[in-house]
Amino acid sequence: MKQYAVPFAALCFSGLALLGCSDNDNTQAAPAGNDNANGITGVWQNEHQVLVLEAGGDLYLPMDNNLQGLRWQQQDDTLTFHYLDNQEQRVTLTTATGQQHDDTLTLSSAAPSQEDSQTTTGDDETPKPSADAQTDNEDAAPLLFHGDYQRANNAVAHISGTATRSQDSELPDNAVLTVALLDNQIETGTPGAQLVAKRLIRLDEDTDTMPFRLYYLPDNLKADHEYQIISQILADGGLFYQSDAITLKRKKHGFADVTLPLTEVMTDSETLRGAITRGKPGQHRDTFTLCNSDRRLLIRGPQSDDLLTAYDNGIRYPQQPRVATVSGLVRKVPGTQEGSTEAALIVESFNLEPGMENCQLPTAELTHTRWQLTHLETDRIILGSAAQVPFLTFNDDGKVKGHGSCNSLNGSYQRDGQQLALPDLATTRKACPTSAIENRYLDALKASDHFRIDGELLTLFDKDDEAVASFQAIYL
């Protein structure tokens, strides 16, 4: 299909890649709270949260813009809730036992589990939640789905509307519709300050009319303020369609229904030549560094998996740079900090080259660089957030120091051209959970015979020319 995209506006949201479990029904059920014949259906409130349980199975959490309700199900006394955590960038499933007595709903929640996560702790391709992430989520879960909730159908209001696009336009793969309610009379440089409520809806059908409902808390609105609503269609982190910001018309209770016409936003494809560098699994930090430049682009798009697979199959040692000629779009995607953006290359087609001919990359020096461990042999090393990442630093006087994740180390090194030996290393003697990795690390350093620096990547090889350890440069 033809590709369109422009840089992100301030309304782009994190966690879009996880919306495979998000809304997939564009039909409009009756708003929650209008008909309580379905028992538990309606609006429930405690001091921490508001739960909107629609008859069609949609779940809304209008008190918290960092959490988005996706769907809920009921089987006997067991309730299952699915929600998206925008900060942790994962979809979480939580089950709870629910007992309804008139206008009180008592929930007893079980431990949440991650349906999808971008946090990895090992070398598997399947993402795994970290121990830290599980602990944080378990602490937050009781505030969401635990305790006594009172029926409070007047605690929320909603805006209904339809986003439309022209009949001859194309919907990109993995498309997500975003709708945001903004306070037009707040002017501040803080990202998201104007945001009152937001909603992300996965678009499964290639339809030109997309109905939506956006819940909000009436107490968050001021009677003398003007409010606007805006919509976008995003895919693979980029912006493909957007609407103008429409000023809402007030009615006796809330706002009148609204139609948001979406228009295409287009940029041309580029053909670029550069080197591929792998990032940590699950964190989507694979980069494309343009040859003879320090310009770096994240690798994204429908053909990115094929490009990275070809790279993985074509390297001799971990993180060996390989040059590729790639055609695609350069556009902004959400950054690691909320409200920030980064440049990415949306891969449409590629050609992987056999070597690095005529492609110079920013190059680090062996000395005065902090070399952070990424691999032992072919195994990627990913430690928990509480652990010290192993590293080395080399001084001009032949001294080396560093850390093995548990113990600090120091000693001397011997260098002759590309030959590099680390025969005399001393360490402290603490025992830690990461001691097994540290022992492998120290064995690899002792086996070092020669080294190679590829741009900002350092690889140590043994006497058989096998890679024993790989590092990423962090400048001092």
Image (tube, rainbow, N blue to C red):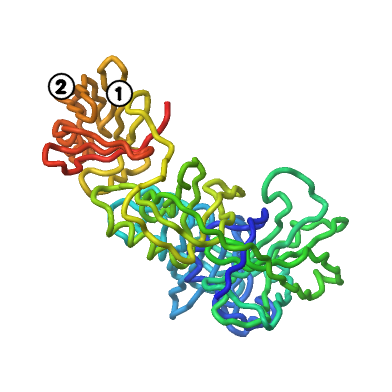
Q: What type is the residue that disc 2 sits on? A: Asp
Residue nearer the viewer, 313 or 80: 313
Residue nearer the viewer, 162 or 36: 162
Q: Position of residue 57 (x, y in %)?
A: 55, 78
Closer to the camera: disc 2 or disc 1?
Answer: 1
- Which numbered circle lies on residue 394? 1
305 over 431 or under it: above or below: below
> Does residue 138 appear anywhere in the picture?
yes
Question: To which residue does mark 2 refer?
Answer: 424
Assign a secondary structure to mark 2: strand
Q: What type is the residue that disc 1 sits on? A: Phe
Q: Are marks 2 and 1 in contact (CB under 8 Å)?
A: no
Is residue 454 rendered to the left or right of residue 93?
A: left
191 over 448 or under it: above or below: below
Q: Residue at 43%, 54% (x, y): give it.
A: 284
> Does residue 279 appear anywhere in the picture?
no
Q: Residue at 31%, 43% (x, y): give it.
A: 383
Q: Residue at 39%, 64% (x, y): give it.
A: 305
Q: Residue at 59%, 50% (x, y): give it.
A: 341
Is residue 158 rendered to the left or right of residue 200?
A: right
Quadrant where the N terminus is found in the figure: bottom right
Real-space Cα separation, disc 2 to disc 1, in angstroms: 14 Å
**Marked residue nearer the N-terminal end (2 or 1):** 1
Question: How many callouts does the rendering have?
Answer: 2
How many residues crowd mark 1 within 10 Å: few (<14), some (14–19), many (20+)? many
Is residue 216 rendered to the left or right of residue 82?
A: right
